[in-house]
Each structure stands twice: as structure tokens, then as C-alpha cells.
Image: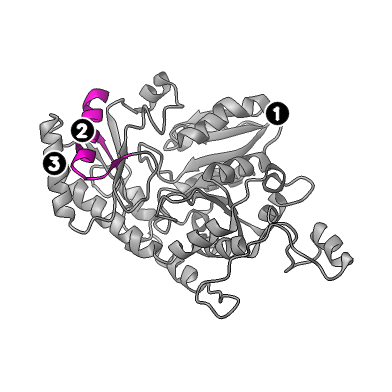
Amino acid sequence: MNTTFKPADLMQDNQHFGEFGGVNPSISDSATYTFLHAQTMMDTFEGKQGGCYLYSRHSSPSNLYLCEAMAAMEGTEDANVTGSGMGAITTTILQICGADDHIVSARTIYGGTYAFLKNFLPKLNIKTTFVDITSLAKVEASIQSNTKMLYCEVMSNPLLEIANISELAKIARKHNIPLVVDNTFSPLIMSPFQMGADIVIHSLTKFINGMNDTVGGVVCASKDFISATKNVNNGAAMLLGPTMDSFRSSSVLKNTHTLPVRMKKHSENAMYISERLEKDGARIVYPGLKSHKDHELFKSMYNEEYGFGGMITIDAGTLETADAFMEMMQDRKLGYLAVSLGFYKTLFNAPGTGTSSEVPLDEQKEMGLTQGLVRFSMGLDNNIERTYQGIKQCMIETGII
């Protein structure tokens, strides 16, 4: 359990005034920027001139404000925001890996990430070995001479397995490869960089923004790595162009100020629902429950004040039952049958046919992802007892309990 790193304090101290003294920083509504001297433009192109803006695909004031907040949250030297979470993931991987390289990745990860590693990267002659990330022996045994990256999620999507970041970092250092960690499910709760990860990725779309009104991503890492991704000659973030719009970055930045309060409430509600439904006989998985196989590991890693997160899974048995259950909950205004997570309303979907549908059925079965599994992202409901009673009634009527 981390007791010294205070991410919310660091984010709170990241303060910028607007151009005319506004409490919100001004939005840079420009794609390109002027220079008083031609030499300054040349120096900026070559990375020799700090504090100047050239072109918004490279950087902009609005994006850099958000970058500073995200770097403060993870405790890294620098960060770079992107137009989507996949933009953050793909540019990071392609910055590090090239033809004939190899990646060791957790087998339970976001479906889009899985598809990129499994289906797209082989076209570039980059291969991936998928492993049970909770087995340190299997992880190390999968590393080859051409392995360039170890990749995982702190809390896996959708099975909620917990990766032992400190031990994985030791393995990565032993083999001189970077540990890249997706922390989308647990912002503020987990601080992977403080545990030894080299690069931390988030989909800003989810908990960090919290409003489900935009997509975005961020890569938090060293200044050297972030600068390399923005290099005009060979930087993946520069040349692939996953730029975040200034208006969107400004909007996300505002929402980061409520992130600590929101994460605490997401966790509080998820714990309440999980404890009550487990007593009712539901087959429920939540890291805050003692029945979770990684409960003690989670407790040894987390920033306690933010709880165990807002993600829950319930096994409804079959896909037909899961569908009926979700449709009933939506009809009774308990949330939305929708993908994504981190919204102020509860969201639920069956990941086997939704957010993890890119994973072949035989591999889903091998990793323990059943067709009847329902993934919940618990919302910020004020009367959580009322929500619990509603979910319980839907479970009774569909025969889940």
C-alpha cells in the first residue's frame, strides 16, 4: 500500500491562469503559430527552442496543460495526450518496436489492444506472446532475445485480474526491456510508475474525463521518451498524427479537478453493491472482496483513500440470461447497456460479445471469459441502496440468484 505518493495533491497544485486572469486556462484555438524570427522557427523544428509552439500536431498550450496534470498524477517527468486511448497505445508500441521485434503481453487486455497486437502488428513483422500475467514464471519464460516490451493492465479488462507491477518491473529491468502499463481502470487508485513501470497509459475517455463526451488518451513517461515520440523525423506520435483537439483537452482538464471525488464515489458504490450481492449468492468478482484471488495483492499496491475501483463483473450463466438481465436493468433506469466505463451513470455490457469480442472464443474460454459475464462500471448514484435493490430484483427475475 502506497502511503507517501499523493497524486491528487500533485494534480491540485498544477495551476494555470487564463490569458485575461480567468480561473480556467485559455484555449489555444490555432493549428499553427507565428514566429518573429525565421531562425526561431528553424530552431523549433530541430527541437532546440523551448517554450515555442510550431504546429498543433506537435504540441499546443491547451494540450500541454493537460499533459502536465497527467504527468503530475502518475509522477512521471512528462506526458503526451492523444486523440484516443488506442492512439496512446499504438504510438507507444510503434515507438519502441520495429520489424523482427517481440512483445510479451498479458492475455487479458482491452479487445482493441489485443487486436492491434494479434492482428495488425504481424503485418509489420512484430510478434506477440500472450501470457497469464499473474504467473511471473510464465512471464519470464516468454521473454526472448528479441523481446522489446512487457505490456499489461494493472486491473485487467474484463476479468479484473491484478498484475504485480513491482515484480513485473523487476523482470523487465533484468531483461533490459520497458514495462508498459495501461492504468485506465484505476487512475489515482494505482500508481504504476511509482512501482517501477517505465511507461503508463490511460484512455482519458473513461474515468479521467468521466463525462463520456469525448475520446482521448495519454502516455506518461520520461522526458526523453515523450520527446522521442514527438520527434519530427521519426516520432510515432508526430508522424502517425493522433493529435488531441485543444477544445477537448481543455474540457478533460476541467474534469480532472473532480477526479479524486469521483473515484472515491465509484469505489464506494462498487463496494456496496459487491458486498450485498455476494451475500445474496451472486457470482461476483470485485477486487475489494476478500473472495477475489488478488485481494491482498491489490491492498499491497493501492492508494487506499481511493478504494478498489468502480469495475465489477457478475456471471449471469448464459449470454441469453445476461442480455435479458442488462435489458431489464436499462428499462428500469439502473444504467445503460453500453460499452466504455467511468461514466457518472452505471454502464454494463457482456464483454465476450462486446468489448472483448476481438478475442477468439477458444481463447476467451481458456482465460475464463464466459459468454454470460456482465461487466459493470458503477456510476455515482446517490442512493446506492435503491440501486442495489433494483439490480437484485432484476437478478431474481432473470434467475441469476
**Type of amino acid under label 3:** Lys
**Where the N terminus falls, by quadrant?**
bottom left
Do we see residue 318 in this rendering?
no
Residue sitting at the far top: 362
Kindly report which numbered mark, 2 or 1, lies closer to the viewer in this rendering: 2
- The region drawn magenta spans 313-337
Which residue is found at the position 79% from the left and 60% from the top? Answer: 47
Which residue is found at the position 60% from the left and 76% from the top? Answer: 19
Q: For marks 2 and 1, give the CA distance.
A: 46 Å
**Quadrant in the rendering for residue 367:** top left
Query: As displayed, is residue 26 above or below residue 94?
Result: below
**Residue 39 point in image, percent of width and height:** 89, 66
Residue sitting at the far right: 39
Q: Which residue is mark 2?
A: 325
Q: Which residue is mark 1?
A: 100
**Residue 399 point in image, percent of width and height:** 12, 29
